[in-house]
Image (tube, rainbow, N blue to C red):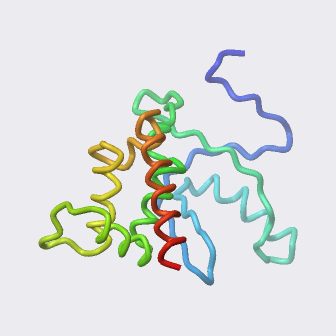
């Protein structure tokens, strides 16, 4: 089997779709909306007919983005935020860290919110232009760990 061929068995529903949008709410969960051909919709209509015209069937999905050449497109793993990037984003939003950044970092604050100043503090301390670099550079990772140690010491002293 060629590397771009997908093995299909009798239990699968194969169709091409286009992403129409997505949403996420605190009380409604996550939703992905797809556009598909009318003929392909019939496959899903049959599922609801079997269940008394009710939706809610559980489906296992495997989705492969295709490029203009009709071939599977490799996923850009760099688009997903890494763990340290996510931590640094949450940290910059934290009021306690913002206070720490004001006391610890004497960088420019003019015109910046407390969150922006905290983010700048992280970037300067870790010697990166973007917090995205925290997950890709061993030096930046080490500096971020050191900054966290200093912050924990500050927290312990501040009570």
Count up the numbered dots: 0
Quick check: 64 left or right of 114? Answer: right
Lateral position of residue 45 relative to residue 154, left or right: right
Residue 3 vertical placement versus 39 (above, below): above
What percent of the width, then of the height, locates residue 1? 72, 15
Q: Position of residue 94 (x, y in %)?
A: 44, 74
Judged from this view, the residue extending furthest toward the front is 157
Quadrant assignment, res 129: top left
Tell me what residue is drawn at x 80 percent, y 66 percent: 57
Q: Which residue is at the front of the view, 92 or 151?
A: 151
Q: Nearer the viewer, residue 140 or 31?
A: 140
Which residue reaches farthest bottom?
Answer: 27
- The spot of residue 134 in percent (x, y) is 43, 44
Which quarter of the figure has residue 95?
A: bottom left
Residue 143 higher or lower than 155, as above or below: above
Residue depicted at x 51% and y 36%: 75
Q: Single out the residue that lies furthest toward the top.
A: 2
Residue drawn where x is 52% and y is 40% of the image:
65
Residue 112 shown left or right of residue 65 in the figure: left
Q: Residue lying furthest left in this view?
A: 110
In percent of width and height, residue 88 lies at: 44, 58
Compared with 11, 4 (above or below) is above
Relative horizontal placement of residue 115, taking residue 86 as reference (left or right): left
Residue at the (50%, 65%) spot, across then down = 22
């Amino acid at each position: 089997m060629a590397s771009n061929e997908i093995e299909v068995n009798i239990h699968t529903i194969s169709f091409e779709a286009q992403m129409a949008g997505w949403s996420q709410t605190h009380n409604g969960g996550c939703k992905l909306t797809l556009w598909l051909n009318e003929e392909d919709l019939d496959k899903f209509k049959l599922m609801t007919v079997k269940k008394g015209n009710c939706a809610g069937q559980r489906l296992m999905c495997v989705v492969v983005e295709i490029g203009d050449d009709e071939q599977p497109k490799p996923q850009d793993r760099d688009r997903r935020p890494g763990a340290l990037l996510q931590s640094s984003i949450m940290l910059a939003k934290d009021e306690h860290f913002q206070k720490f950044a004001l006391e610890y970092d004497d960088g420019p604050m003019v015109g910046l919110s407390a969150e922006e100043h905290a983010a700048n503090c992280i970037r300067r301390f870790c010697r990166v232009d973007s917090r995205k670099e925290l997950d890709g550079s061993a030096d930046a990772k080490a500096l971020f760990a050191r900054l966290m140690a200093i912050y924990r010491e500050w927290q312990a002293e501040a009570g």
